[in-house]
Amino acid sequence: MTVRITLADMHIVVGMMRAAANRHVMPHFRCLDRADIRTKTSALDIVTIADEATEQDLTAALQAAWPGALVVGEEAVAADPALLDGLASADLAFVIDPIDGTANYAAGVPLFGIMVSALSGGEVIGGAIVDPVCDIAVLAARGHGAWLHDQRGRERRLHVAPPVPPQQMSGNASWRYLPAPVREAVTRNLPKVAGSWDFRCAAHEYLMLVDGRCHFLLFNRTLPWDHLAGWLIHAEAGGYAARFDGTPYRVTNHGGGLLYAPDRESWHALHALLFGLT
């Protein structure tokens, strides 16, 4: 059974995200003690008490609003990776990134966000990203466009940047996790684009991309909480994305990379430039 998620539903989700941010994220920002931060898999992979509290808050709110839905959070998966197995088949599932950009958050850098996506039968049908610092949200429901809501309650439709030759594009290539041969090619060719930058936060990079403030993003790791929401919002804003081999991105893909561009033609041109094919 395919479940439908509307823009009104995603507004409800955004309200939950903003409420959780007000309860847990912002009160702890720049107020964390050392004991409030712990390492997961490496020194670059950390979690805070705010991540955990936000995920628990959103999980409870989503399950109350949509009884029977599968809710999968990043921190829950860290404890039980098998939770990912249900995303491809669930009638309705939500994926939570309670704080994307935790390293920035823990360091007191105001570049972090909350991301939630909705899926049905493995297809992404809704997505939302909230910037708690500026109280800005972007959201989409499949087939209904992408929208920005600012702190004054104003709404406007989002559109990606117009396509341009890759030498005129700006964006971010997150090269740190690329396999060595690909990393060497991308870092060698990245200076050929007009500009590049790294926020250490996919949520804020997606905010730039879907609002036409940059042209491209490149990621190697494609874990669902990091990218499902941004992928749908970008598509609904008119953009084109594919894995490095040109195949479509799926919820079951946790590797193989992901490249975003304004349209299919500019994707191929950028891919050729960054991967050294031209």
Image (spheres, rainbow, N blue to C red):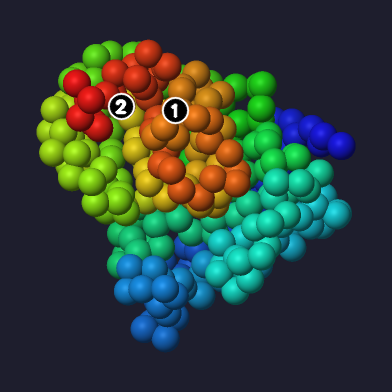
The residue sitting at 75% across, 40% down in the picture is 121
Give 185 or 135, whichever is nearer the viewer. 185
Which tag, 2 or 1, sits closer to the chain's start? 1
274 or 261, nearer to the observer: 274
At which x and y percent is residue 17? 61, 52
Label 2 with label 1: CB-CB less than 8 Å? yes
Relative to 165, is 220 above or below? below
Q: Amino acid at mark 2?
A: His
Q: Marks 2/1: CA distance?
A: 9 Å
* Residue under numbered circle 1: 246
Answer left or right for 108 relative to 6: left
Q: Looking at numbered disc 1 in the image, what kind of residue is underneath it?
A: Gly
Give the residue displayed 33% in from the left and 30% down from the top.
216
Q: Residues within 10 Å of mark 2 (few under 14, many from 20)?
A: many
In the rendering, at what x and y percent does residue 34 appear? 36, 83
Q: Secondary structure at mark 2?
A: helix
Q: Which residue is mark 2?
A: 271
Q: Where residue 190 sits: x, y (%)?
A: 18, 35
The image shows residue 75 at horizontal and vertical percentages of 56, 67
- Between residue 66 and residue 270, name the one nearer to us: 270
